[in-house]
Image (cartoon, rainbow, N blue to C red):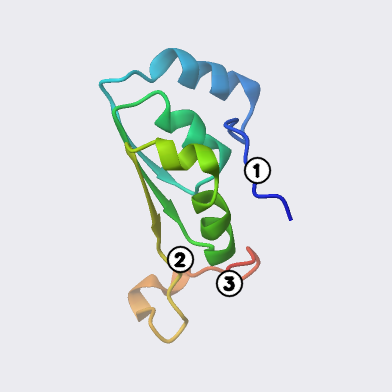
C-alpha cells in the first residue's frame, strides 16, 4: 500500500481554483476530513486544524512526508460516537454506518 497523498483536494476544479485565489498566509483554517485538501490548504494558510473520523485514513495522512514539514497543521482523530454514546437528542443526525468508519 502506498502512503503517497498528493496535495490536490478531491473536489471540483472550480472549487480548487477558488481556494487558490482566496486562501492566504494570514488565514487560519478548519477542515472536517483530511487528505489532499489538508496538504493543499496547509501550504496556503497560517494555520490549519483538520479533523479526521477514520482511524485508517488518519494514519495514512499522518504518514505523508509533506505533512511532517508543515508545522502549521494540526491533524486530530475524532472517532464517531457509538450508538450507545449518542443521546436521544442527536438520534435524527446519526450516521447510518454506510461511510466505512472504523
Q: Is residue 70 left or right of residue 65?
A: left
Residue at the image point whose x is 71% and y is 50% from the top: 2
Residue at the image point whose x is 44% and y is 30% from the top: 41
Work out whether mark 1 precedes mark 3 in sequence or the reverse, and give the earlier one: 1
Q: Is residue 80 above or below residue 47?
A: below
Mark nearer the viewer, 3 or 2: 3
- The 10 Å Cα crowd at callout 3, few under 14, some 14 to 19, many 20 or more, is few
Give residue 102's mark: 3
* Residue that carries the numbered disc 1 in the rendered image: 4
Give residue 93's mark: 2
Work out whether mark 1 precedes mark 2 in sequence or the reverse, and give the earlier one: 1
Q: Position of residue 87 (x, y in %)?
A: 35, 79
- Report helix, strand or loop for mark 2: helix
Q: Is residue 53 left or right of residue 90?
A: right
**Spatial separation of the CA atoms under disc 1 and disc 3:** 21 Å
Cβ atoms under marks 1 and 2 closer than 8 Å:
no
Q: Is residue 44 above or below residue 98?
A: above
Work out whether mark 3 precedes mark 2 in sequence or the reverse, and give the earlier one: 2
Instruction: Name the one closer to the observer, 96 or 22.
Output: 22
Q: Position of residue 73 (x, y in %)?
A: 36, 41
- Report helix, strand or loop for mark 3: loop
Q: Position of residue 7 (x, y in %)?
A: 57, 32
- The 10 Å Cα crowd at callout 1, few under 14, some 14 to 19, many 20 or more, is few
Which image quarter is the C terminus in? bottom right
- Report helix, strand or loop for mark 1: loop
Q: Residue furthest top?
A: 21
Amino acid at each position: 500500500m502506498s502512503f503517497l497523498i498528493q496535495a490536490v483536494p478531491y473536489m471540483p476544479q472550480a472549487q480548487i481554483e477558488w481556494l487558490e485565489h482566496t486562501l492566504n498566509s494570514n488565514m487560519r483554517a478548519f477542515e472536517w476530513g483530511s487528505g489532499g485538501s489538508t496538504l493543499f490548504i496547509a501550504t496556503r494558510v497560517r494555520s490549519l486544524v483538520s479533523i479526521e473520523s477514520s482511524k485508517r485514513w488518519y494514519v495514512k495522512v499522518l504518514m505523508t512526508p509533506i505533512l511532517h514539514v508543515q508545522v502549521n497543521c494540526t491533524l486530530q482523530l475524532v472517532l464517531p460516537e457509538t450508538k450507545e454514546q449518542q443521546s436521544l437528542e442527536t438520534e435524527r443526525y446519526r450516521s447510518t454506518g454506510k461511510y466505512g468508519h472504523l
